[in-house]
Image (cartoon, rainbow, N blue to C red):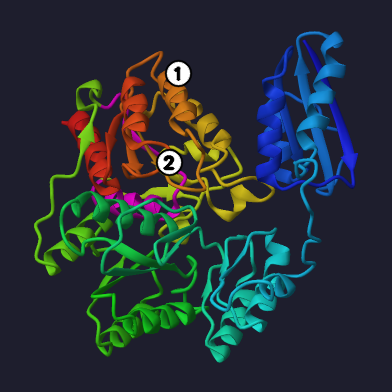
Amino acid sequence: MKDHVELRSGAYADSVTLLQVSRAVQAAPGVVAAQVAMATGLNLEVLTGMGFDVPASSPNDMVVALRLDDDADLAAALAAVDAALVPARPASGASEVAPPRTTGSALRRTGADAVALVSVPGASATVEAMDAVEAGRDVMVFSDNVPVEEEVALKTYATSRGALVMGPDCGTAVIDGVGLGFANTTRPGRIGLVAASGTGCQQLLVLLHHAGAGLDGVGVTHALGVGGRDLSAAVGGLSTREALRRLDADPDVDLVVVVSKPPAPEVAEALAKDAEALATPVELGLLGRGQRDLTTVAEAVLERLGHTAPAWPVAGEDNTGAATGPLLRGLFVGGTLCDESMLMASEVLGPVRSNIPLSPELALDSTDPGDLLADTHTMVDFGDDALTQGRAHPMIDPTLRNEQLARAAADPRTGVILLDLVLGHGAEPDPASLLAPAIREARADRAIPVIVSLVGTDLDPQGLDAQRDALVAAGAEVHLSNAAATRRAIQLLEGARA
């Protein structure tokens, strides 16, 4: 084996591009392992964990780390890196138009109803979003790691101009049936969503899609993401109010549903009063202690529309045995799904530690693999800002989650592993092809129960049935409802205690 590590100062590519480069080089002849990444702290930890010795560097350096069968393969591997980094160019003969140099100038080339989508490193996102608002457009800020003070300033300015800011850290939106960011493909209907929660929004989208087959009006045409902090005390629901106003004024919307991570109590109280003043009925799905889970919210929506909720699908039940240890380990790519599972599990099992804890004393250090295996129940959100700096979101790059899955399975205290897998546009094209082998390997030494909530629809590009079948074949029990998956995990742990 031969390791080759080099720094390319001044070179830059975004995390998704570098993930694709790494995978392309990984497939080159003679390459055992390849990681091409910006030299952020988190990426350096990953490289060190892979056994690479990286020289002193700064986050502005690109690291090319290769593990080869033989020295003779190095030249070809480096050529593969260079080829993968070259951006695609138009076919010969095609005309080229000079790209716009600013967000505002790009918007001036579009129609008046165009929405700007900002997806740049968080430090630069506010400037671009302000430019869009200044141009009089709504903007979806996909970027995370944006300071909350900048979010408040941006939304305050947008409110003064009648513009809607979706985000920062807005992963999902559906506008007139068109998905932005991570969005499932669902049939349209007369329901409008306002979501201070990306995966919470996706969970409702897929549950309502599944339940609404053959039912008139049970579908979502608009899902306006507002960012996970919008209902915090600092932001005060600035974008939620604008989104509610718009959906209330839409004659094609019969029912509005608000879904959120646990909000600030005073903001939730004010929101409830605002909702009562609207002409359109509003169903509030705000996660919190003593509040309803998202599946129960979906069932309430169906009841309001005069329908009975179906039995939510589950597959692979016979493959799951009893818990093999005393602790529950939840490893999530969706922050709201992690929140929901923590709220449910803590009511039955007791305290759950997390990198997005329900209370400060339960916090753990998500950058410390040892802390993630604390001597109590743990749940980790791998999409949290601290774990995505300089990296693609785990719905695109599941490397960190899969590594922790192996560690959790090797820990004899682990009794049940709870996972999510989110489908839709923007997500990995075939996520089960990466997760299923990790599950199979995790269960190789002992048949540890692995429970998965699969958030997807039969219209998603990945194919819901194929993804489900791959997970079941690897030994997982697969639910459409995250709440049902969590209840099953709790049931297995309680069964082992009896």
The N terminus - image quarter? top right
Give the x, y percent position of residue 121. 70, 58
Give the x, y percent position of residue 15. 68, 45
Residue 486 versus residue 168: which sits nearer the camera? Answer: 168
Q: Residue at x 75, y 34 (%)?
A: 36
Whether residues under marks 2 and 1 lie with C-beta atoms below 8 angstroms apart, the answer is no
Q: Residue at x 37, y 36 (%)?
A: 463
Report whether residue 288 is seen: no
Q: Residue at x 13, y 45 (%)?
A: 311
SS at circle 2: loop
* Count of all numbered marks drawn on residues in the image: 2
Image: 69 above or below 328 = above
Give the x, y percent position of residue 155. 57, 80
Give the x, y percent position of residue 466. 35, 29
SS at circle 1: helix
Point out the stretch of residues depicted in magenta: 323-348
Residue 247 left/right relative to 53: left
Q: Which residue is mark 1?
A: 441
- Amino acid carrying label 2: it is Pro
Near mark 1 (Cα within 10 A), the count class, few <14, some 14-19 or many ≥20, is some
Near mark 2 (Cα within 10 A), the count class, few <14, some 14-19 or many ≥20, is some
The C terminus - image quarter? top left
Image: 269 above or below 335 = below
Image: 482 above or below 415 = below
- Indicate yes or no whether the magenta region holds residue 340: yes
- Amino acid carrying label 1: it is Glu
Report whether residue 39 is seen: yes
Q: Which residue is mark 2?
A: 461
Q: Quadrant of residue 324?
A: top left
